[in-house]
Image (cartoon, rainbow, N blue to C red):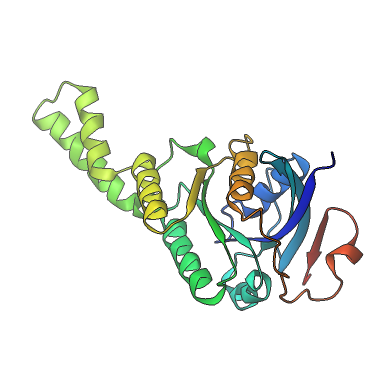
Amino acid sequence: MTNRSTSYKLVLLGESAVGKSSIALRFVKSQFQEFQEATIGAAYLTQSIVVGDPQVTVKFEIWDTAGQERYHSLAPMYYRGAHAAIVVYDITNRQTFDRATKWVDELREKAPGVKVIALAGNKSDRQTECAVPEHASHQLLINCILNILFLVIGLQSLELLSWISCMCAGGTETTVQDAEKYAQENGLLFKQTSAKLATNVIELFKMIAENMPLNEPPQPSGGTRLGNTPDQMGGSGHKCCT
């Protein structure tokens, strides 16, 4: 018996350099580029995944949007009419997580047709790095104070010193917990991913597909295509607004 098939428009949103294009490239072509060029306007890709029992082939029409602020005004043309969205942040940069919450708010306000929103904490391969790099000066001050305590008071336990530093500065784990809590409170799906190591990327899209209303026919995606339709673009990837 032939599997039933359906298609959904999915948009990737998030700040520049969080790894949106890398996630899309990993899912569509199983590739990773260490130095990924910044997306200009948006890129279009397609990929299918089989889920469910009975099995359903879900084709994602993926719009990978630019993260630079100067392209923000173009975003509505791509998320308008979308059925699903992935909002990506960089786990080593707290500011990108804060911005991700703004994207979620914008989707809820301006894209009511989006049935599933997934929050993706990307770059899990860099977990050991500080999750709040913009506070690096605070961390330096904390380290200086701890070094003084070590010399003056004579703290002998390096493990205790590390524990105090961790408690003062925070880290990636706290950010992940915050993201999970935020996702639960706002009805979002959540995955921590690494496009570089291919960690949870396929699982992310599979999770979205499984949470789509597969028994309901998708509504027309609509939105602005800016030129050729996807069928006319050819191949599995295309960039517009270049």
Q: Nearer the viewer, residue 226 or 171?
A: 226
Who's the residue at 16% across and 30% down the image?
150
- Eyeballing the image, is 55 above or below 10? above
x then y, percent, for residue 16: 58, 60
Q: Quadrant of residue 65?
A: bottom right
Residue 42 position, x and y percent, is: 72, 66
Mark yes or no: residue 234 visible: yes
- In the image, residue 165 lies at what x, y percent? 25, 37
Specify whether 3 is left or right of 98.
right
Image quadrant of residue 157?
A: top left
Can you say which quadrant of the picture contains the C terminus? bottom right
> Relative to 42, is 91 on the left or the right?
left
Q: How many marks?
A: 0
Q: Is residue 62 visible?
A: no
Residue 171 image position (x, y, % from top left) = 35, 42
The extreme front residue here reads 1
Relative to residue 79, is residue 146 depicted above or below? above
Q: Closest to the observer: 154 or 205? A: 205
Work out whether residue 160 or residue 59 is closer to the camera in this orientation and state it: 59
Q: Please, is residue 213 above or below residue 241 in the view?
A: above
Q: Which quadrant holds the N terminus?
A: top right
Placement of 151 over or under 224, stated as above or below: above
Residue positioned most to the left: 153
Q: Measuring 54% from the left and 43% from the top, which residue is drawn there?
A: 123
Q: Is residue 171 left or right of residue 46?
A: left
What residue appears at the point 16 percent right and 36 percent down from the top-left corner? Answer: 148
